[in-house]
Amino acid sequence: MEYKDSKCNAYDTYASDAKLYPSLPPVVVPSAPELIRVEGSAQPYRLQKINEIQKEIAAERDKRVKLSKKYHRAVRIVAGLDNALVVSSMVLGATGIGVLSTIIVAPVAITMEGAALGLVLLSIVGGQTNKKLSLIAEKHEKIKTLADAKLSTISDLISKALADDQISDEY
């Protein structure tokens, strides 16, 4: 080690003795294997992938059918409850007006009118819930229809490929 009197520079002293960063071995990046063109080997792989996609789309379609049925059932239930609430509020309102005409039982009439108003508010909430459930059911119905169309397209392409005895990379 040398020490310079006029200039105190530690970098000059140690620059030749050691490196700042150690040297690392080169990194080997694995690459994809070379593609070998064998005419018959791609067909089974393509058929396997087509079958997997077909099963996946069929499972999605079945799932959407179940969800669509559940939401349609919920829409019918909410619509029935909504109708019952409307009828109940009309009956309570009419009865409240009839009771109010006697003037003797005014507190009962006010309570009946308040209950009718509460039922009307619940009916409004039920109507909004029914709209949301209808939209969700419609969405699942559309997805089911799209899955059916895609399955039909795949079936057509498979039958065309089997007739030609060749599966192409087009789709």
Image: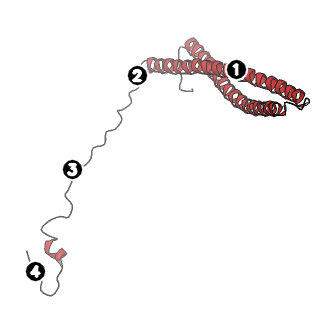
Q: Is residue 51 left or right of residue 5?
A: right
Q: Is residue 153 visible?
A: no
Give whichever of discs 3 and 1 has the lower sequence position: 3
Q: Secondary structure at mark 2?
A: loop
Calculate the distance from the C-alpha at mark 4 to the C-alpha at mark 1: 93 Å
Give the mark toward the camera: 3 or 1: 1
Q: Secondary structure at mark 3?
A: loop
Which residue type carries mark 4? Tyr
Percent of width and height locating residue 30: 31, 39
Q: Is residue 56 visible?
A: yes
Residue 163, compared with residue 97, is above or below; it is above
Which residue type carries mark 3? Pro
Mark linked to residue 3 = 4
Which residue type carries mark 2? Val
Which residue type carries mark 1? Ile
Q: Residue at x 41, y 26 (%)?
A: 37
Give whichever of discs 4 and 1 has the lower sequence position: 4
Q: Is residue 14 left or right of residue 129?
A: left
